[in-house]
Image (spheres, rainbow, N blue to C red):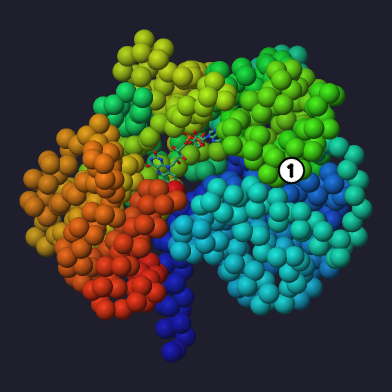
């Protein structure tokens, strides 16, 4: 190969890299300091930053949706409060690690790494992965905690790769790899056990003395008398404040408020709801491809905000500002703002309670229950039985423990710094970027389950908000039936009752570009969402004259009965338009004594499924990660084993290879 060849190769490689990671680059260049959650510092050189700010411990996170970031910040905060360490907590994105080998050997680095897609690193960690691949770090001591989901083939793969590459670089692991498992719903307890073991191990490597003087704020709080146009009333970014120009940029740091032009209920039954929402992206910088995910940015319902405020005796109108005590930190959400705004728009107040949160707040518990609360926060089983199993949110839990007495001693500063920040929820887009280029459709099941222990149902934040908007748009008086009400006008009326902030996250869940490749789609419940997009895409191809060679589409869908049959009226139409190339096979689970699920239908149609697989069909599975995806994979392995006369283990290897080659794709949650 001569130098011209090498140059051409380099240009091609660069072009491919830019193409594949275009969104990451766009986010990187457009990232702005007013983002609501990512800590930032002046210099990007990590060693310089540590030195300049006299830091004694480094926590790095690679986060896709904010979970790894959340755990990293909690870990950093506890290191500070428990051991009085001066911790730098930083996103690996935008961080220059080139000089990491120069870090003094008494500084430990803790990595928090999420796994995304098929064992991939988060989008913002591409450079981090590249750096680790060739790093030499003989003096580095480190810990790793992974955030993953065991229902995926490549469980915690990015964290495992991080560990492997660091060991190959000569670095020393402290303790063991921690593996948070969202699939089992045990991430919180996985983290707590890992953290306790790591704190023990750290003593052997660095000089630690426990201070434990209780909560110490990492920010300077000031309280203001009056509100002006620079105060945030729920705006997510600075440019949504009055007299600012809104940037037409949409990413995880800058969602765009987008109009909902249509919304309707899809279920026919009473008591369960599924909302179809159409966001209008015409004229917006938001672009998507069929199979992508859209993130919807929620906020808390009025009743939950009021419950929270009264539990802590908070003054809703109080205006505060929080500024970090050094330049490497950043306020978790935009300030100045009011206490009520922070509770409504920026804090996650209704999810399950963490044992660690109870431990932090125990210091401020009413005197008569303080010791009981401290003990409960240390008792994994007792906490699971008394708090988690009852599906209490924080306010429910504290009022239950204090028998209704408010927890007025908890400082606002402590709440702000302890509670997680509200994060966007992702939805598999159910429209087609070819058939519906100016619309993003979302198909969301409304999370609402009765809870006799609290007297009020356990509700999902985003899906109940989408339902509130839907009812408001279609018949405002019917919103009275809702279990909770939202301030759907939004901050300074920005949402007007029919808009919400969104951004798109690109996904690898894609139809084959070769239209002649047959596809087997398996998506019960709202798992059918991206497949509606896929089928609409194929219909668009046919109506644009591309149907000559179209491969067959088999869609296995599952629902309880006719009442929750999603988009029932649309499918026959698609079948006609696709001229018999599209077949829908429905598993009804509740119309007879014998439950029938998609995996049973797959078995019933074994010959057709195998025929398509032998023609090189792609398999796509979407929906419930906990059980369905595993049952489906098992059914397919059984069929392959039978067809090829091999063992189940060998058939599993075949499916694994299909996954690696993109022939078997999953979009499960
Ligand atoms: P949350 O507020 O996030 O609550 C989550 C669950 O916890 C709910 O069931 C809620 O009832 C329960 N809960 C709330 N508080 C407590 C408590 N204190 N204790 C115990 N439990 C509690 N969903 C769809 O409907 N359609 C899709 O197409 C879709 N696609 C997805 C694609 C991806 C890639 C991912 C990751 C997820 C997808 N989801 C989809 C799921 C979706 O992102 C949300 O998780 C879901 O809609 C619930 O959001 P929520 O804000 O309403 O509920």
Q: 409 above or below 68?
A: above
Residue 62 position, x and y percent, is 61, 55
Secondary structure of the residue carrying tag 1 is loop
Q: Which residue is at 26% across, 54% downward?
A: 600
Q: 7 above or below 267?
A: below
Q: 661 above or below 546?
A: below
- Between 58 and 267, the one lying in front of the other is 267
Q: Which residue is at 34% across, 46% downward?
A: 527
Residue 508 in view, yes or no: no
Q: Quadrant of residue 92?
A: bottom right
Q: How many marks?
A: 1
Q: 326 above or below 156?
A: above
* In this rendering, position of residue 655 left or right of residue 77: left
> What residue is shown with label 1?
379
- Decide: few, some or many residues near mark 1? Use Cα within 10 Å; few <14, some 14-19, many ≥20: few
Residue 511 in view, yes or no: yes
Quarter of the rendering occupied by the N terminus: bottom left
- Between 52 and 626, the one lying in front of the other is 626
* In this rendering, position of residue 263 left or right of residue 239: left
- Between 220 and 74, the one lying in front of the other is 74
Residue 295 position, x and y percent, is 45, 40
Q: Which residue is at 71% across, 56% downward?
A: 194
């Amino acid at each position: 190969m001569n130098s011209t060849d090498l140059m051409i190769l380099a240009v091609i490689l660069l072009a491919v890299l830019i193409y594949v990671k275009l969104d990451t680059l766009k986010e990187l260049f457009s990232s702005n300091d007013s983002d609501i959650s990512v800590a930032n510092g002046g210099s990007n050189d990590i060693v310089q930053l540590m030195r300049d700010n006299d830091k004694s411990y480094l926590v790095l996170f690679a986060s896709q949706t904010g979970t790894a970031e959340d755990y990293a910040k909690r870990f950093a905060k506890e290191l500070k409060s428990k051991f009085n360490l001066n911790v730098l907590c930083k996103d690996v994105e935008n961080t220059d690690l080139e000089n990491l080998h120069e870090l003094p050997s008494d500084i430990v680095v803790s990595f928090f790494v999420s796994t995304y897609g098929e064992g991939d690193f988060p989008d913002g960690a591409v450079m981090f992965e590249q750096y680790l691949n060739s790093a030499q770090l003989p003096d580095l001591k480190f810990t790793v905690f992974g955030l993953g989901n065991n229902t995926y083939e490549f469980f915690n793969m990015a964290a495992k790769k991080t560990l492997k590459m660091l060991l190959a670089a000569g670095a020393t692991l402290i303790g063991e790899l921690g593996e948070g498992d969202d699939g089992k719903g045990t991430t919180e307890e996985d983290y707590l056990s890992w953290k306790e073991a790591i704190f023990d191990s750290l003593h052997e490597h660095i000089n630690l003395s426990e201070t434990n003087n209780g909560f110490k704020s990492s920010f300077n709080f000031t309280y203001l008398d009056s509100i002006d146009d620079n105060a945030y009333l729920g705006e997510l970014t600075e440019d949504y404040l009055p007299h600012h120009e809104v940037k037409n940029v949409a990413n995880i740091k800058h969602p765009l408020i987008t109009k909902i032009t249509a919304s309707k209920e899809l279920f026919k039954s009473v008591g369960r709801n599924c909302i179809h929402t159409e966001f209008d992206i015409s004229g917006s910088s938001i672009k998507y491809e069929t199979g992508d995910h859209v993130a919807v940015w929620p906020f808390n319902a009025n009743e939950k905000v009021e419950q929270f405020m009264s539990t802590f005796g908070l003054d809703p109108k109080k205006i505060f500002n929080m500024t970090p005590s050094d330049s490497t930190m950043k306020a978790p959400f935009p300030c100045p703002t009011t206490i009520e705004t922070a509770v409504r728009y920026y804090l996650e107040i209704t999810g399950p309670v963490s044992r660690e949160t109870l431990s932090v707040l125990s210091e401020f518990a009413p005197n008569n229950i303080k010791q009981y609360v401290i003990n409960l926060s240390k008792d994994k089983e007792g906490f699971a039985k008394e708090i988690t199993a009852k599906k209490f949110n924080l306010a429910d839990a504290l009022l239950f423990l204090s028998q209704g007495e408010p927890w007025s001693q908890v400082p606002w500063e402590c709440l702000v710094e302890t509670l997680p920040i509200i994060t966007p929820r992702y939805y598999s887009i159910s429209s087609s970027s070819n058939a519906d280029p100016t619309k993003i459709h979302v198909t969301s099941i409304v999370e609402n389950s009765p809870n006799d222990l609290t007297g009020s149902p356990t509700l999902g934040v985003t899906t109940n908000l989408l339902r509130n908007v839907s009812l408001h748009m279609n018949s405002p008086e019917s919103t009275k039936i809702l279990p909770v009400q939202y301030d759907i006008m939004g901050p300074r009326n920005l949402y007007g009752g029919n808009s919400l902030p969104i951004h798109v996250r690109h996904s690898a869940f894609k139809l084959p570009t070769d239209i002649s490749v047959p596809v087997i789609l398996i998506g019960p419940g709202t798992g059918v969402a991206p497949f509606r997009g896929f089928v609409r895409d194929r219909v668009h191809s046919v109506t644009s004259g591309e149907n000559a060679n179209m491969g067959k589409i088999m869609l296995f869908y599952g629902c309880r009965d006719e009442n929750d049959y999603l988009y029932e009226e649309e499918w026959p139409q698609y079948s006609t338009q696709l001229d018999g190339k599209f077949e829908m096979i429905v598993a009804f689970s509740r119309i007879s004594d014998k439950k029938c699920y998609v995996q049973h239908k797959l078995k019933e149609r074994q010959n057709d499924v195998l025929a398509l697989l032998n023609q090189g069909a792609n398999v796509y599975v979407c929906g419930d990660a906990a059980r369905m995806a595993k049952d489906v994979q098992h059914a397919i392995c059984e069929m392959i084993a039978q067809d090829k006369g091999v063992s189940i283990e060998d058939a599993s290897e075949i499916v694994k290879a299909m996954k690696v080659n993109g022939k078997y794709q999953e979009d499960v949650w």
